[in-house]
Amino acid sequence: MMDWKLLNRNVIEEFRINSGRVAQFGDLPVVILNTIGAKTGNLLEVPLITVIDDGHMYLFGTNAGAKKQPAWIYNLRANPVIDVEFKTEVFRANLTELDGQQRKDRIQIQSQQTPQFADYIASSAPRQVAVFRIDPL
């Protein structure tokens, strides 16, 4: 079974050493969310691949196609204003959850561009995958 905490620690360390680049993700852009735990209030660092389109950064709660939402979604819903690390910068942002047609459109666009993403959407059904836009403050 995958040790996600260890994997995340290693990804974060590599990200910070290599100015935001993580070898296992190739050229895909990575961010680190500095979230606040919804239940604990603790600072939690979450590395995620982001999608950059039309000048915006998006995050998808696919949880690798699992039936369960990733924990970071609940943290962002409770505390949407956080620090985000991207490449060598850290900036304050509001993470806005998309809903309705905006959410559906963003998932459709990403599914057409990335077959693995489309597989994640299919395997996570009937769960609705959350989509967030990173809005720098």
Image (cartoon, rainbow, N blue to C red):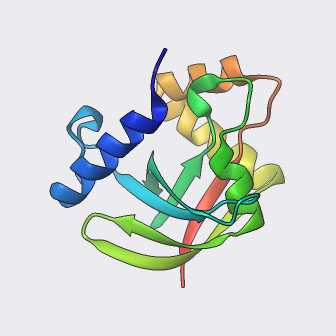
> Foreground residue, 43 or 123?
43
Based on the displayed image, in which of its 4 quarters is residue 24 positioned?
Answer: top left
> Foreground residue, 91 or 34?
34
User: Looking at the picture, does residue 89 appear above or below residue 11?
Assistant: below
> Foreground residue, 51 or 94?
94
User: Looking at the picture, does residue 118 appear above or below residue 10?
Assistant: above
User: Looking at the picture, does residue 117 appear above or below residue 90?
Assistant: above
Q: Tell whether 68 sits left or right of 64.
A: right
Q: Tell whether 8 sits left or right of 34.
A: left
> Residue 96, image x and y in percent?
68, 66
> Foreground residue, 114 or 77?
77
User: Looking at the picture, does residue 22 appear above or below residue 81?
Assistant: above
Q: Is residue 49 in view from this perspective?
A: no
Q: Tell whether 5 sits left or right of 23.
A: right
Write the residue at 60% across / 33% down: 63
Most distant residue in the bottom direction: 137
> Residue 25, image x and y in percent?
29, 36
> Residue 91, image x and y in percent?
43, 78
> Residue 93, image x and y in percent?
55, 76
Write the residue at 74% across / 60% down: 38
Most distant residue in the top direction: 1
Write the residue at 19% across / 61% down: 19
Q: Tell whether 28 sits left or right of 41.
A: left
Write the residue at 74% across / 52% down: 74
Image quadrant holding the C terminus, namely bottom right
